[in-house]
Amino acid sequence: MLKIAIIGAGAISTAHIEGYLQFKDRCSIVAISDVYTDKAEEKVKKYGLDAKVVSDYKELLQGDIDLVSVCTPPYLHAEIAVDFLYAGSHVIIEKPMAASLKECDEINEAARKNGKIVSVIAQNRFRNPMMKLKAVLDSGLAGKIVHAQVDSHWWRGHCYYDLWWRGTWEKEGGGPTLNHAVHHIDALLWMRGRPNEVQAFMSNVAHDNAEIEDLSIAMLRYPDGTLGQVTSSVVHHGEEQQIIFQGLDARISAPWKLKASLSASNGFPEPHAELETTIQHYYDHLPNLPYEGHTAQVDNVLTAIETGAPVLIDGHSGRDTLELITSIYKSASTGECVKLPLEPDDPFYTREGVLKHATHFYEKNSHVENFTDTAITTGRFAGGNN
């Protein structure tokens, strides 16, 4: 029986707790830590847990915790993860992995030195539409991919950034590019690979209580000359998200939509019904996952600990995602066309470098300590909990 600790008892911890509770024969939540102990106590009471509550996670470092879920604000991820890795625990880190590429490297080095697992939450991979889209891409039925498109469209009211740690480069690490589009950027990298050039713009158009962006648009160039684009937003009503791949032979996406064309003699499109039927048949016969979302990723990590199998999303995947996001911030802040990879001598490699060079749109002059514990939205499609 694996012993689990939850660090951070905010809204996102619910997804982790409920995930672990699906596997009561394999693991048990024995501790919850939060600087606001009343929030941790509420979680213990709500879920009927036999778990101790502590205000300082370091009280748990001397215990025999097998696996830790880090659910704190992003600026604390690296310190907590590294401490537990050296204490002998495996670690699941809520997105984003850390506040800088340097911190990602420190986490991965701690995992390597101690022979422990790090998995970064990217629960969209563990959803049927995403898994099936990846399988169709891998089948090659759509042909060579010539364009990729991510629409990470969310909506957050002005008061969203009143929370004390949100809306600052220091503590939140960025706006929707980092904290919302991270899900789809991870999926894009998983399915399409890393671009080698990024040109981006960002702005703050609706939240003058935040330093960070609330809208960004990035253009991507891949080594083979094909292109991609990523829109990250918290100003889009309807919260509709999608990831689209245009192949030479067909267009496929999540949410699932399929279209294939043939060329008429004058170059205009005609329906390619035969290919559409073939791809749809392939898609329809792909198996569904036994679990989805956070629960599926928890299962993946538990299985890795139990059997030695690799996790689907490790610390290197988490770092790759942050690298692309950081390149978007660098390009949007400097006007440069950024070339990947970003090296350790890059001004944006450290948190201090990001704080110094990233564009500050507004200064945050006031805040609230906590919101009422209300439900959080997860978007129209396979969204994350933000």
Image (tube, helix red, strand yellow):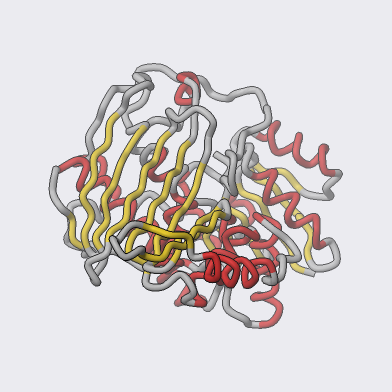
Residue 334 picture quarter: top left
Residue sitting nearer the eye, 51 or 211: 211
* Number of marks in the rendered image: 0
The residue under the point 49% across, 29% down is 155
Quarter of the image for the N terminus: give it.
Answer: bottom right
Res 353 visible: no
Q: Is residue 244 left or right of residue 84?
A: left
Residue 280 location, x and y as percent?
61, 66
Residue drawn at x 72%, y 50% as measured from the top left: 17
> Is 258 placed above or below 358 here?
below
276 on left or right of 49: left
Q: Residue at x 65, y 23 (%)?
A: 372
Residue displayed at 76% across by 55% down: 29
Q: Residue 318: give x, y in percent of width and height.
A: 44, 61
Snapshot quadrant of residue 354:
top left
- The answer to whether 203 is drawn above or below residue 83 in the figure is above
Q: Is residue 258 visible in this depiction of the protein?
A: yes
- Left or right of 119: which side holds 284? right
Image position, residue 64 (x, y; %)? 69, 66
Residue at far front of view: 265
- Residue nearest the viewer, comparing 135 with 11: 135
Q: Report x, y in % for residue 386.
A: 54, 39
Considering only vertical position in the picture, is 214 above or below 81? above
